[in-house]
Structures are given as C-alpha cells and as structure tokens.
Image (cartoon, grey):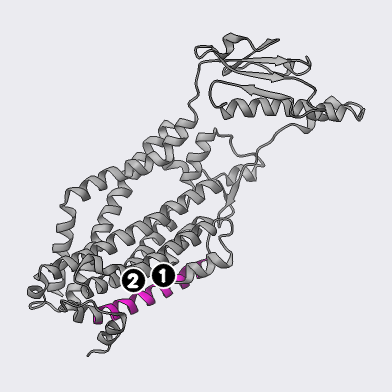
Amino acid sequence: MKKTLIIIRREFLNRVSKKSFIILTVLMPFIMAALIFVPLLLSQIKDDNQKQVVVIDKTGEYMPLFKSDKYYAFVEDTDIRPEYKTSDSPVEAVVCITGNLVENPRAVTIYSHSEVKQELLSLVERTLNDAVRSQKLRAYNVPELDKIISDVQKEFSISTVKWDKEGGETSSNTGIAIAAGFIFTFLIYGFVMAYGGMVMSSVVEEKANRIVELMVSSVKPFQLMMGKIVGIALVGFAQLLIWGIMLTAILAVCGLVFGVNIMQGAEMNVAGAAAMQQPMPELSESQEIVTALANLPYGELCLMFVLYFVGGYLLYASFFAAVGASVNEQEDSSQFMMPVVMLMVFGLYAAMYSIENTNGPLAFWASMFPLTSPIVMMIRIPFNVPLWEELLSLAILYGTAILFVWVSAKIYRVGILMYGKKPSIKEMIKWMRYQ
C-alpha cells in the first residue's frame, strides 16, 4: 500500500506542476462563464443608429402601416431614385410594393446594397402579413371585425414553474436544464477521454523508455497500474475543485451584474405566495435566466457527476492502461482505441437524441449501459430521474468498472514487459488466463 501511495503522489505532483495544467485550470472557468453570459449580453446590445428605409407603395394601402421606431425610420417615396443605389447612400433599404398583395402575394421586393438584415426582413413581412390577413378577413363582412382581429392578435407568454418534493414552486427553464445537462455531459466525456488518455500515454512513455523495468522490480504491476489511475484521477478532482470554486465566484459576480443574486436564487421558493393565490413576481428575461440557473438541482448534479466521473474513469482508464501496456508506441494503440471512441461518440449522440424524451427507451437503456451511462445520465438528471434508475445505473457502472480493472490488471502485468511485437486481441485474451 505504501508503494502505491508513492506512485500516486509522483503522478499527482508531476501533472499539477506542469504549466499547461495551471493555465487550463485558471482559464477554463472564465471560458465556461463566458459561454453562458456573453451571448446573453451580446443579444441585448442593439445598434442605436436609426436607419432609413424608403417605402414605395404604388397602391397607397400599405405605407401607413409602417411605423418608425428607434431602429428604423420609414420614409415614403414614389420611385427608386439613383441616389438610393450609390454606395454612400444613407438609405438602408428600399421596400417596393407594386400591387395588391391579396391578389398578387409576390408584388413586394426589398432592395439593398447588402444582404437584408433578418430583423428588417421579419419586420416588413410581419407588417404586410398582418395587413393581408386583415384584408382577406374584411372580404367576409364580419361585424366588428377590427375588434375581433385586435383581440385575436394579442400575444402571451408562458411561464414554467417546477414543483419540488414539498410542493413548493420554483422558476424553471427547459433550455437552461438542457444546457446544464450538456455541460456536465461534455465535462464527463472530456475528462474521461483526457485523463484516460493520460494514463495510456504515461504507461507507453515509461515502457518505451524502459523505466518500467526498474519500477516493476520494486512494485507489483497491479500497484503500478492503480497508482497511475488513482494519481491522475486526483489531478482531475483537484482541477474540478478549483473550477467549482472559481465558477461559483464568477457566477455570483455575473448574477449581480444581471440584477439577481445567484447565490440566493435557489431560495426563491414561492410556496407562500402560491398559498396566498398570488402570482410569481415578474422578472426580466435576464433575471429569469439567472434565476433558472440558480434553481437547478446543483447538489444532485454535482454528486452524480462525481460518482459517474469516478465510475466512468475507472472503467475507461483501466482499459487505457491495459492498452498502453500492450503496445510499444502510441500509434499502435489506434486499433484498440477506435471501438472505445466510437462507443463514447455513440453516447454523445444518444444524449443529444434523448433531449426531447429524457424518459424514452433510448435515454433509459443508454443510461443503463455502463459504457455510455456516464454520458447519457447527466443529460437526464436536470429533468428529475427516478432515484431507483440512478442507483441501478451506478451499480451496473461500478460492477463493470471493477470487472474491467480486474481484467486490465491481468493484461497489464504481462504486457508491461512485452517488447518488439504488436499483440493481437487473441493474445491479450491468453494473457488474462495466466496465473
């Protein structure tokens, strides 16, 4: 045991002292926070310069419908003038309506020096579609038609509220739940592949340099393999811990910037307001997003992430260690790695296709299959997976991981001292039978 601890300490200190580890550990939380908040900030930034749009309406029916706002100023004209076509023209676009749109829906064209902005195109389409729809309805001579149209066109938005186990209410957002699931899914995928690959690279490097011959003279191959696996796993946990602390601080600051204290967002339980038959307090779009982020089940997500990371890492790292011990060079490992990579990619696709139905057959069975469960289950957890499914999935995962460690140890102890020959799968199976 003491020798295994020495190997664990060596692997841990060797990894955390590298510049690449330090730089990645410091920068990644900022990158993750930027992925959440920068798109939100950018989406709220609008161009304050009002752009001029000329409307040429041959019918005289549609021009009054175009109302200027702080982004676009609609100006009426009778023809497309030469100055509109010059590159230095202040006119953003020209909307030309040549006929009645009820009779000829294609009698409208927008001219511009560049691609018409989607925002302007949508505004023109929406304005003209409403007018054409009203014209068609008026042809039926329905009494009080304008009042009916005004009433029908009133828009509404749906708020989503989630009940907890005690019946309390918390603000929720399906998009945020999906995003959180994907973040944890990609973290599992990235960490298992990255740190599992580190185990294989370390074994191959020491085997190629013949250092391993000296090491196995003083420690057992199993101790060496487990020392590497546990040491590199601790590197991963150290990195995750630092990321968690930094992300908490960064998100707290960002929450204050957006007007919501994210550290208190999870406490926004409105069961008392519901009992008093009062609606939930209205929040801005940015506040709703930050509040939904705070109301995610972080405790369950973090606990399950750690358990699935450990199980998935043990399963794949033991396999990578066995592969590294069996080959002489990194390039020789591709024939063994390809099936594993394909399984993990399948897990990613299964997670993506499970979003629409997180309790469907694909999501359920992929979250039970041990080679894909660490990836797929993380996408399901924000949507309240039954406890028995989580426990069953973990039991299968850890049972398979222990089996893989046992099998890999038998391959490792033989392959670590084999040189000059590329082993086949048949030979590796023979190594497993050696006593």
Image coordinates for residue 403, horizontal then vertical, percent: 34, 79
Q: Do labels 1 and 2 touch, CB within 8 Å?
A: yes
Corner quadrant of residue 111: top right
Look at the image and tell me whether residue 266 can be seen: no
Give above or below for 430 relative to 135: below
| Residue displayed at 16% across by 72% down | 4
Say whether residue 256 is left or right of residue 241. right
Q: How far apart, in angstroms, are the residues tagged by discs 1 and 2?
A: 8 Å
Give above or below for 420 relative to 134: below
For disc 1, the marked residue is: 371
**Which of these two is toward me, 318 or 428?**
428
Name the N-terminal-most of marks 1 and 2. Answer: 2
In this picture, which residue range is highlighted in magenta? 386-410
Say whether residue 27 is left or right of residue 299. left
| Residue displayed at 55% across by 15% down | 50
User: Dividing the image into 4 quarters, which one contains the C terminus?
Assistant: bottom left
Q: Residues within 10 Å of mark 2 (few under 14, many from 20)?
A: many
Mark 1 residue type: Leu
Asked if the magenta segment contains residue 393, the reply would be yes
Look at the image and tell me whether residue 220 can be seen: yes
Give above or below for 62 relative to 198: above
| Residue displayed at 51% across by 51% down | 178
**Which of these two is toward me, 395 or 272?**
395
For disc 2, the marked residue is: 315
Q: Secondary structure at mark 1?
A: loop
Image coordinates for residue 81, horizontal then vertical, percent: 63, 9
Q: Secondary structure at mark 2?
A: helix
User: Dividing the image into 4 quarters, which one contains the N terminus?
Assistant: bottom left
Image coordinates for residue 385, horizontal then vertical, percent: 52, 62
Image coordinates for residue 406, horizontal then vertical, percent: 29, 80
Q: Residues within 10 Å of mark 1 (few under 14, many from 20)?
A: many
Magenta region, main secondary structure: helix
